[in-house]
Image: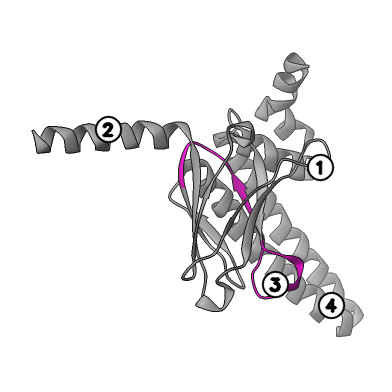
């Protein structure tokens, strides 16, 4: 009987978890205990419907309200802590999203947030490479500047091709649409047409 009750509890817990979005987080130390962590939607009327919780023993458990489900938002702490703890985009999909708040924050263990994380990491790597080249460009001679400029263009072309593949693979979900909206201006007309997202947006309107 006890085993049956335990299995029923697990089934009930799993069903509830699948219908809600929970953000489980860790921090680098207990220096932040007692501070508040917020999930703030990127869109919505002001004041936006924010969800929040307190940090305890360098962890937090943030249950997303029903009205904030399936939305893009930002997990952040209070402004004076953001130099040490990078805010991070989190999509409130059903299930549990694991978030690590640190100088470079990350999210994992939830399908759409894994996609977001892949995009963030690719973007971070690209931005770092381009920044280094632009810094080099400022002190280079005329001939070298032309070569560096071409190198930056080639890096960016490869980057946008990679991002387009992420968009195509996720064109039917909100994360893919979000990434598309940020990079649309850098896609070719052929890529925009291939994605099919613009047509779907027109239909929705």
Give the distance between the C-alpha atoms of the residues marked 1 and 2, in whole angstroms: 37 Å
Judge left or right: residue 66 versus residue 127: left
Q: Name the residue carrying label 4.
A: 137
Give the distance between the C-alpha atoms of the residues marked 3 and 1, in whole angstroms: 22 Å
- Helix, strand or loop at label 1? It is loop
Looking at the rendered image, the disc whose residue lies closer to the viewer, 4 or 2, is: 2
- Earlier in the chain: of badge 4 and badge 1, it is 1
Q: Are marks 2 and 3 in contact (CB under 8 Å)?
A: no
How many other residues sit within 10 Å of disc 2, few (<14), some (14-19) or many (≥20)? Answer: few
- Helix, strand or loop at label 3? It is helix
Give the distance between the C-alpha atoms of the residues marked 4 and 2, in whole angstroms: 59 Å
Q: Name the residue carrying label 2.
A: 11
Q: Name the residue carrying label 1.
A: 47
Identified at 60% across, 49% down, the residue is: 90
Give the distance between the C-alpha atoms of the residues marked 4 and 1, in whole angstroms: 44 Å
Q: Are marks 3 and 4 in contact (CB under 8 Å)?
A: no
The magenta-colored residue range is 77-96
How many other residues sit within 10 Å of disc 1, few (<14), some (14-19) or many (≥20)? Answer: few
- Helix, strand or loop at label 4? It is helix
Q: Do the residues labelled 4 and 1 touch (CB within 8 Å)?
A: no
- Helix, strand or loop at label 2? It is helix
């Amino acid at each position: 009987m006890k085993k049956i009750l335990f299995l029923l509890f697990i089934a009930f817990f799993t069903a509830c978890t699948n219908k809600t979005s929970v953000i489980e987080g860790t921090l680098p130390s207990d220096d932040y205990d007692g501070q508040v962590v917020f999930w703030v939607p990127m869109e919505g009327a002001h004041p936006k419907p924010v969800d929040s919780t307190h940090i305890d023993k360098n962890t937090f458990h943030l249950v997303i309200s029903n009205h904030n489900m399936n939305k893009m938002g930002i997990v952040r702490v209070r402004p004076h802590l953001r130099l040490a703890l990078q805010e991070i985009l989190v999509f409130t999909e059903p299930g549990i999203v694991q978030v690590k708040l640190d100088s470079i924050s990350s999210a994992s263990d939830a399908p759409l947030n894994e996609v977001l994380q892949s995009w963030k990491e690719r973007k971070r790597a690209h931005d770092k490479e381009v920044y280094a080249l632009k810094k080099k460009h400022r002190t280079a001679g005329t001939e070298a500047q032309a070569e560096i400029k071409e190198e930056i263009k080639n890096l960016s072309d490869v980057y946008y091709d990679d991002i387009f593949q992420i968009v195509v693979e996720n064109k039917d979900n909100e994360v893919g649409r979000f990434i598309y909206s940020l990079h649309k201006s850098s896609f070719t007309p052929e890529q925009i047409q291939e994605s099919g997202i613009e047509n779907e947006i027109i239909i929705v309107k």
